[in-house]
Image (cartoon, helix red, strand yellow):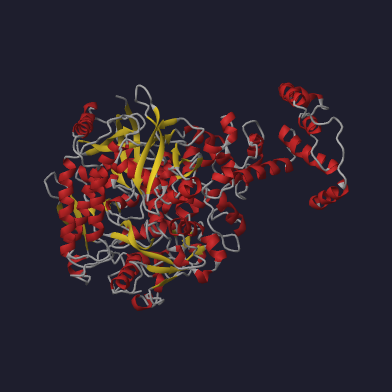
Amino acid sequence: MAVYQHDVIVVGAGLAGMRATLAAQEAGADVAMITKVHPVRSHSNAAQGGINAALESRGDSWDDHAYNTVKGSDYLGDQDAIEIMCQEAGSAVLELEHMGVIFNRDEDGRLGTRHFGGQEVARTFFVADITGQALLHALYEQVMKYNPRVYEEWFVTSLVVEDGKCCGVVALELMTGKLHLMKAKSIILATGGTGRCFEPSTNGLVVTADGQGLAYEIGIPLMDMEMVQYHPTTLKGNGVLMTEGARGEGAYLLNSEGERFMKTYAPNMMELASRDVVSRSEQTEINEGRGIDGCVLLDLRHLGRELIETKLAYINEVALDFANINLAEEPCPIRPGNHYEMGGIKTDVHGLTSMPGLYAAGECANVSVHGGNRLGANSLLDTVVFGKRAGIHAAGYSKQIEQINVPDSIISKDEERIKSFFDKKSNTDTPATIRLAMGQAMNEGLAVFRDEAGMQAAYKTILELKDRYKRLGVHDTGKIFNTNLLFAFELGFMLDTAETICVGALARKESRGAHYRTDMPDRDDENWMKHILVTNTGKDLPVVSFLPVNVTRWEPQVRSY
Amino acid sequence: MKVKLDVGRYNPEADENNHFREEFELEVEDHFTVLDALMQIRDYEDPSLAMRCSCRASICGSCAMKVNGTSGLACNTKIIDVIRKDGSVKVDPAGNLPVVKDLVVDMQPFWNKMREIKPYIQVKGPEPEAEYIAPQQSMLDLVGAVGCIMCGACYSDCTVLEVDNNFLGPAALAKASRFIDDPRDEMDAERFAQLNQYTGVWDCTRCMACVEVCPKGVFPMDRIMSIRDKIMNAGMKNTNGARHAEGFASIIKNYGTLDETQLVIKTFGVFNPIVALSNIKSLFGLLPVAFRAFRKKKLPPIFHHKIVGVAFIKKIFKKLEA
């Protein structure tokens, strides 16, 4: 068994992971990145619309961006963290520009913006409708330039804890099937969201709640997991994302009667209200019989072919490839679909979790800047701002640690687990069948509209599936590129995470942000303006606890758009 | 609809018959992609089937492979279209790269070449405090090249790589063009010097395969050609490639048709002793070709004749050159 050692290990190589890695390296740390897929395959790719920043030099104010974010979060976001994010946004975007991102320009050659939801000011910087891809590849260019160690297609199976500190990971090398102990003074989880806990989801197949599962396993609290964003515009059929940028550029949402129905729900902001609001409005139209085959329509025709082909080329391609629709000629059927997890591993504004040495950044973390509902184009911002902060802090912390005391034998637990998966191969259950049942149950009980009975039913299913998971075997016993084994591990992380989503949702006795209960439709600031933490204490069921929301300047108001 | 998928498989851990083909029969719906079908097989029939995939929406670039011999993304290739076109579906791993297991290939050579072209923006002076000022159109023009998702479909079907795996390949060269065309990057001269050498832009044979298979409309070959133009415009013409391009043009201009003998002389610089000496190996390499051509009576005439109306051709050139 080979043993590896670094100052900082970053798990995940999407935007948050790469930003953290580059920052830690710049701060002088020996940093390595472990990623289960090649960095440019990461799901940050799929972000389309843009990245928010209020450039003060432009006369915009970060204050206003912060207020929009607080309001968008339905007052559940921590305002100190939101202030930091919005204050650092401008320099974060300029940094990306200096790294080579080909941001859209205005006529003077300066950075140009587009409108995005939940904000009256156009402050979203973008590259056509491939902003995530453009950013991800630009960061990977920097990784190729500065050359930190990257363990590609290595999958982290567990975190190593000694003396109450996180000091390493155990990782499976997919190409060889070998298990490795990797010691580190600090670990940054940057593994992305929880999309595959739901079916369907806009998220890629690799988005399997690994970081959340890893942290939960060692008793780190997950916070506000009930806040699951359903994106208003996902394509009928395979559920692929159609960017909010389309509405930012002026697209309409129409019901079966051809009406711009958002005038009923958000007369001021119309199609550009917050995502939770738009998704609920669409679902209401569909439920009340004004949908078409479970969908409403996204209409871009009036934007003209030229705009569509330059600024929205990718969704034009997606609509043509997957729905046979030419956006310049006909409206496109769309529906709300699982998209983003606002909740995550609880961290402070440096990305530090409740355990020394363990950090989290990006979608797997909850700082919390998104609260009950994330504004479009704030997620890319979150990844680069808090990825960088986590990288810097982790590098600094690592300098104070002299040595790492981890017995090499710690790896045996994961070796046993793999062996036990192989031993149970006579069981006919497969990761795919259990995952599908989980995804459907979650989408049934924890979607746009929720109620006690529906959430209980989903939770019951999750508990049954967890029981089935205990007997799950891995049928492919090969060593090289054994994805059967990989999926078995991922499924464990997803089931634990799905449970925390159910438990959080059942605990929150009100409606706030993305968590809308038809049986408790009102926001209850008196009792519920607080974070819900779900923690694994080693017992059968997780423990629920609460934390107050950090309010700096903005007291809760009625939220209308 | 019932379809059969003929999958080219490889199990590196088997003692014998580790390369084999396997046919899977399955029920698919009209909207099914090749990836949907492969996942169905992997998830419910044979969990050992190895492949890479993630986004299902042609943006992550994981699932490039060959379908009926042509590379592309499995996730945006509809089964029904393949059946309509070819009648059957045969899936194989991407080409020009070592196979790891089943449909998984080792992308390391691809990435090594990407690194060789220094794929990051380089400036000489200090960074501006705010953003670089760049014309709106210059950034829009880069979207095409930046749209490359590094799936490797072009690399897989590149006919040059088939015979010489030192070639940098279409994706890396398209990436290089992205920096050359970026008004912020200031390393054109260094990039030109590198790409002007063996393994660079002159090794492309303009077969168009990369353009045809690219799932994102990057047009790698066109970008390679544009780098060639820029290199020549920068005055770097001491390559067989540049001599070939200029020779080709001048022969057409003066004769109206191609004189292969003259083209060889111009390309290999036969009347320039230094150049000719450096090409001596290539020149001798041509002898067997010439001999075979002679035997088959296909040797071009030594004295080439101008076509009737060559004056018109000259006029066209004049117009183009103006």
Q: Is residue A341 above or below residue B285?
A: below
Residue A415 visible from this viewpoint: yes
The residue lying toward the viewer, choosing from B108 and A144, is: B108
Query: Percent x, y for residue B257?
Result: 81, 41
Query: Percent x, y for residue A193?
Result: 32, 51
Q: Quadrant of residue A52?
A: bottom left
Query: Percent x, y for residue B184?
Result: 60, 49
In the visual, does A331 lie left or right of B125?
Answer: left
**What residue is rendered at 76% in x and 23% in y?**
B295
Residue A392 visible from this viewpoint: no
Quadrant into which the C terminus of chain A falls: bottom left
The residue lying toward the viewer, choosing from A85 and A190, is: A190
Q: How many circles with numbers are drawn on the protein? A: 0
In the visual, does A137 lie left or right of A404?
Answer: right
Q: Please identify the residue farthest to the left as the structure is shown.
A: A539
The residue lying toward the viewer, choosing from A124 and A199, is: A199
Query: Percent x, y for residue A289?
Result: 30, 74
In the visual, does B213 lie left or right of A471?
Answer: right
Quadrant into which the N terminus of chain A falls: top left
